[in-house]
Image (cartoon, grey):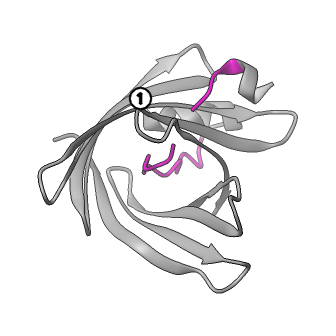
């Protein structure tokens, strides 16, 4: 069902859910609505999330590397009630995109990509406040230890 709703992340979406006061998981997705800016070890960017119904979001992202290269991405995010998990699909022109599933534990959201050729990628987001979180992209090869590849900070607004 989640794939039928749209093909999609990651973020590098890069926003924690963090709405512990909301009554349903679907409402938690609405936390992302708005404009976010981020900086990390190899560039910076902006993401603008908008609601698409009560249980889906879409986002436009522009990312600029430290060397000045611009990449534009499109994201779709939701919650799969049958699987009990968040999902995120990221599209780019160069790579076609990636699919992630997410879990929340306390103030930490972890997005796992589908494995590819013995490699596993994940993004871990740790919420500091309603308007600030830290994130890191990590990689594991052949089931080995997780190693950080990119680390950064995301803020609500410009």
Vertical placement of 7 versus 28: above or below?
above
Identify which residue, 48 or 61, lies in the foreground: 61
Instruction: Give the quadrant of residue 129.
Output: bottom left
Q: Split into 4 quadrants, where in the image is the C terminus?
A: top left
Where residue 67 appears, x then y in whole percent? 13, 58
Q: Which residue is mark 1?
A: 59
* Residue depicted at 59% across the width and 44% down the height: 21
Binning the other alpha carbons within 10 Å of mark 1 as few (below 14), some (14 to 19) or many (20 upward) gives: many
- Residue at 12% x, 51% y: name it: 68
Residue 106 seen in the current view? no
How far across and how far down the image is residue 83, in percent?
85, 40
Question: Viewed as shown, does residue 70 lie left or right of 81?
Answer: left
On screen, residue 102 above or below 46: below
Q: Is residue 151 above or below residue 46?
A: below
The residue furthest top is: 53
Q: Is residue 9 magenta?
A: yes
Q: Is residue 66 left or right of residue 148?
A: left
- The quarter of the picture where the N terminus appears is top right
The magenta span reads 5-21
Residue 154 placed where, x, y %? 31, 55
The answer to whether residue 41 is left or right of residue 126 is left
Magenta segment main secondary structure: loop
């Amino acid at each position: 069902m989640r794939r039928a709703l749209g093909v999609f992340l990651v973020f590098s979406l890069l926003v924690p859910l963090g709405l512990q006061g909301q009554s349903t998981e679907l409402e938690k997705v609405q936390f992302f609505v708005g404009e976010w800016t981020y900086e990390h070890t190899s560039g910076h960017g902006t993401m603008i999330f908008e609601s698409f119904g009560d249980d889906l979001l879409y986002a436009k992202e522009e990312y600029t590397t430290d060397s000045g290269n611009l990449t534009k991405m499109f994201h779709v995010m939701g919650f799969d009630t049958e699987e009990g998990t968040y999902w995120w699909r990221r599209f780019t022109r160069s790579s076609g995109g990636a699919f992630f599933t997410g879990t929340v534990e306390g103030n930490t959201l972890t997005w796992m990509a589908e494995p590819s050729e013995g490699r596993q990628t994940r993004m871990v987001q740790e919420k500091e406040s309603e308007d600030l979180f830290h994130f890191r992209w990590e990689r594991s090869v052949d089931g080995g230890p997780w190693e950080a590849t990119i680390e950064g900070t995301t803020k609500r607004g410009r």
